[in-house]
Amino acid sequence: MNSEHSMQRIATFCGQCDCGCPELWVDPDAPEERRVVITDDHGQRIQMSMGQLGDLVGDVKGGVLDGLLAGSR
């Protein structure tokens, strides 16, 4: 069972408001396939492995989301 107090905050996205911004956490007590936790400001969360996070970061750095983000600015 994952416990909130064992999670380590890595990053807060936005952080310029008091809305409960999305955050990236690592839960060292979770199974490997669920160690990375991303929470949003609606109380939802996704969990993934470090490998999946690495793939996601690589895709973002490679420009996979550039077209999507260009339309939202």
Image (tube, rainbow, N blue to C red):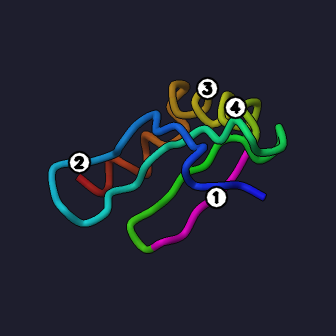
Query: Which of label 1 and label 4 is nearer to you?
Result: 1
| SS for dot 2 | loop
Q: State how far apart marks 4 and 2 are (Cα).
A: 25 Å
Tag 4: Cα neighbours inside 10 Å, few (<14), some, or many (≥20)? few
Dot 4 and dot 2 residues touching (CB under 8 Å): no
Numbered circle sitting on residue 46: 1
19 or 58, which is in the foreground? 19
Numbered circle sitting on residue 4: none
Which residue lies under the disc numbered 2?
A: 15
Residue drawn where x is 37% and y is 48% of the image: 69
Q: State how far apart marks 3 and 1 are (Cα).
A: 18 Å
Which label's residue is closer to the chain start, 3 or 1? Answer: 1
Q: State how far apart marks 4 and 3 are (Cα).
A: 5 Å
Dot 1 and dot 2 residues touching (CB under 8 Å): no
Numbered circle sitting on residue 58: 3
Label 4 sits on what residue type? Answer: Asp
Residue drawn where x is 60% and y is 43% of the image: 6
Residue drawn where x is 48% and y is 72% of the image: 43
Segment colored magenta: 43-48
Which residue lies under the disc numbered 4?
A: 55
Dot 4 and dot 3 residues touching (CB under 8 Å): yes
* Residue 52 rendering spot, x and y as whole percentages: 74, 37
| SS for dot 3 | helix
Which label's residue is closer to the chain start, 2 or 3? Answer: 2
| SS for dot 4 | helix
Label 3 sits on what residue type? Answer: Gly
Classify 22 as above or below 32. below
